[in-house]
Image (tube, coloured by chain):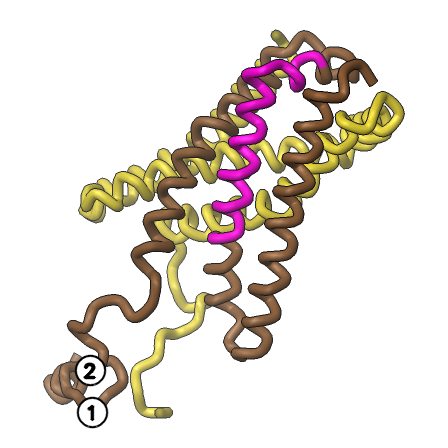
């Protein structure tokens, strides 16, 4: 067993965009599955319970820490959406050429950030 | 890669050599497809939620409640709950399978995951139903 070639651990690889987009897809997805769904259920449950429960939710989420959580969750959604679309393209067998793959990875990460900014601009301005 | 490594790779004496060419062993393709189908559901319903929230004039109780108890938003929320919790369960399952290797712990983690996601979805659907059917609170 010891003589078989094993994949070296994370630390020896030079980071590339494709690695970043992959781990961000997992981080944003599992972040939403845990924190995101909890906040969503709290919002929905508070809304169904009445004004007092909703005000508690709104004051916590309107605090600086709450806003950081909400911005983080919105980024998680738009990032996961962008890299998810990248997955659909890869699923049809396209985008595996090294340069195309690298470009698409960078676009995917950038688009997650841009969409988050657009979303909050709409929240604040509309 | 040396020639001897290549030969060993293809031989029937190794674990991978024994399973090569047999197709999937469990329900991988089913899981893979369901993850994609629910991803499309999430794309539509969560975008609907995000855009609707961004366009709301305010985030106070009355505005939010009026929006959420409408027929189309409430339907979208209910569909979103099913799709999102299903997708989240599948994604978390992959996380567990990647990092939890002891069979007993893996079983416990998946059992806990099922309780959390099915329970969470049921709570969400109940909340939507209450919003829609309880009238003015």
What's the CA distance linking mark 2 and mark 1? 7 Å
Q: Residues within 10 Å of mark 1 (few under 14, many from 20)?
A: few
Which quadrant of the figure has residue A50?
top right
The circle on residue B17 is 2
Whether B104 is drawn above or below B70: the answer is below
Whether B99 is drawn above or below B72: the answer is below
Q: Mark 2 and mark 1, same subunit?
A: yes
Q: What's the magenta region?
A: B66-90
In the rendered structure, does residue B87 fall within the stretch colored magenta?
yes
Q: Chain of mark 1?
A: B
Chain A image colour:
yellow
Rendering coords of residue B85 (x, y %): 55, 44
Q: Classify mark 2: helix, strand or loop.
A: helix
Q: Name the residue that disc number 1 marks.
A: B13
Point out the image quarter for the N terminus of chain A.
Answer: bottom left
Q: Classify mark 1: helix, strand or loop.
A: loop
Rendering coords of residue A55 (x, y %): 85, 24
Point out the image quarter for the C terminus of chain A.
Answer: top right
Seen at 60% across and 66% down, the residue is B109
The circle on residue B128 is none
- Judging from the image, what is the letter of the chain drawn in brown? B
Rendering coords of residue A52 (x, y %): 89, 25
Camera-side residue: A19 or B135? B135
Query: In the rendered structure, are the residues bearing label 2 and label 1 in contact, judged by CB atoms less than 8 Å apart?
Result: yes
- Tell me: A60 left or right of A90: right
Whether residue A121 is visible here, answered yes or no, is no
């Amino acid at each position: 067993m010891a003589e078989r070639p094993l994949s070296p651990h994370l630390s020896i690889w030079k980071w590339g965009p494709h690695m970043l987009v992959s781990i961000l897809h997992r981080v944003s997805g599992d972040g939403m599955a845990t924190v995101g769904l909890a906040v969503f259920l709290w919002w929905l449950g508070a809304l169904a319970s009445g004004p007092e429960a909703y005000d508690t939710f709104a004051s916590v989420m309107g605090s600086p820490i709450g806003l950081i959580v909400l911005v983080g969750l919105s980024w998680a959604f738009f990032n996961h959406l962008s890299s998810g679309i990248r997955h659909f393209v890869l699923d049809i067998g396209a985008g595996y050429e090294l340069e195309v793959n690298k470009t698409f990875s960078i676009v995917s990460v950038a688009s997650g950030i841009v969409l988050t900014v657009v979303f909050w601009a709409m929240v604040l301005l509309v | 890669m040396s020639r001897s490594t290549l030969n060993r790779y293809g031989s029937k004496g190794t674990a991978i050599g024994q399973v090569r060419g047999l197709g999937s062993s469990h329900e991988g393709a089913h899981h893979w497809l369901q993850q994609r189908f629910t991803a499309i559901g999430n794309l539509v319903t969560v975008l609907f939620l995000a855009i609707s929230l961004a366009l709301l004039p305010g985030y106070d109780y009355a505005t939010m409640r009026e929006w959420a108890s409408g027929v189309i938003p409430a339907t979208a929320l209910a569909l979103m709950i099913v799709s999102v919790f299903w997708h989240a369960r599948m994604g978390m399952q992959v996380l567990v399978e990647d990092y939890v290797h002891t069979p007993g712990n893996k079983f416990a983690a998946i059992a806990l995951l099922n309780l959390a996601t099915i329970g969470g979805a049921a709570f969400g659907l109940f909340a939507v139903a209450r919003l829609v059917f309880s009238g003015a609170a």
